[in-house]
Image (cartoon, rainbow, N blue to C red):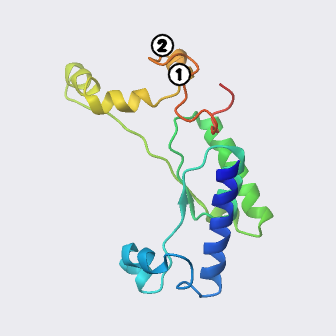
Amino acid sequence: MFSEILVSEGMASVTAKVTCGDVNSFPAAERFWALAPASAKAGKWPEIWIASHGPRMLRITGRYADAWFPVIMMRPKNYAAGLETIRSAASDAGRDPTSILPATGLFVFTGRSRDEVDEALSTPFAKTLAFNVPGKEWTRHGAQHPMGRGFHRDARHSAAGPR
């Protein structure tokens, strides 16, 4: 919960600074602008994309973010539920709920044959991706996660529902 409070306070601070046009007075402003994209240096504030999963962070996303980019594997119905939480929080904050871009990232392994796909799936990269999939998803597909059925890389935060 402490991290959600810090994120919420930080987002509120950044949003307030941008809204009032005072974008140079926050701590580390000089370092931030040195790393900011050219569009930000030209006066257009960079979009805020948040990869939230738990209920509190989803609400923070609705209050402050320009886009939602969840990074854990979830079923479409759970993605829809997370997006509904975000849109409800946006509406409660007086924002247009449809202005928040829903996004995701998916990895697809292709090949000219099943053997090529199997070879790609046996690479360290593919194995690292698979390791980060929650244990319950492995079980759903008839496999056992190396860390056990209850494994979730961040068990505290998940829009994917109870484990």
Specify the quadrant that holds the C terminus. Answer: top right
> For this rendering, which residue is in front, 33 or 68?
33
- What x and y, as percent, mark residue 104? 49, 47
Q: Residues within 10 Å of mark 2 (few under 14, many from 20)?
A: some
> For this rendering, which residue is in front, 3 or 78?
3
Badge 1 vs badge 2, beta-carbon distance below 8 Å: yes
On residue 144, which mark appears?
2
On residue 48, which mark appears?
none
Residue kind at label 2, given as amino acid type = Gln
Task: Identify the residue at image location x=44%, y=17%.
Answer: 146
Q: Secondary structure at mark 2?
A: loop
- What x and y, as percent, mark residue 16? 66, 78
Task: Identify the residue at image location x=56%, y=84%.
Answer: 25
- What x and y, as percent, mark residue 59? 71, 54
As drawn, the residue found furthest toward the right would be: 92
Tell me which label, 1 or 2, sits earlier in the chain. Answer: 1
Residue 86 visible = no
Task: Identify the residue at image location x=53%, y=60%.
Answer: 49
Q: Secondary structure at mark 1?
A: helix
Residue 79 visible = yes
- What x and y, as percent, mark residue 109? 30, 32
> For this rendering, which residue is in front, 106 or 1?
1
- Which image quadrant for residue 42? bottom left
Task: Identify the residue at image location x=49%, y=75%.
Answer: 28
Q: 32 above or below 79? A: below
Q: Residues within 10 Å of mark 1 (few under 14, many from 20)?
A: many
In the image, taking residue 82 as reference, residue 36 lies left or right, namely left
Residue kind at label 1, given as amino acid type = Gly
Task: Identify residue for label 1.
Answer: 135
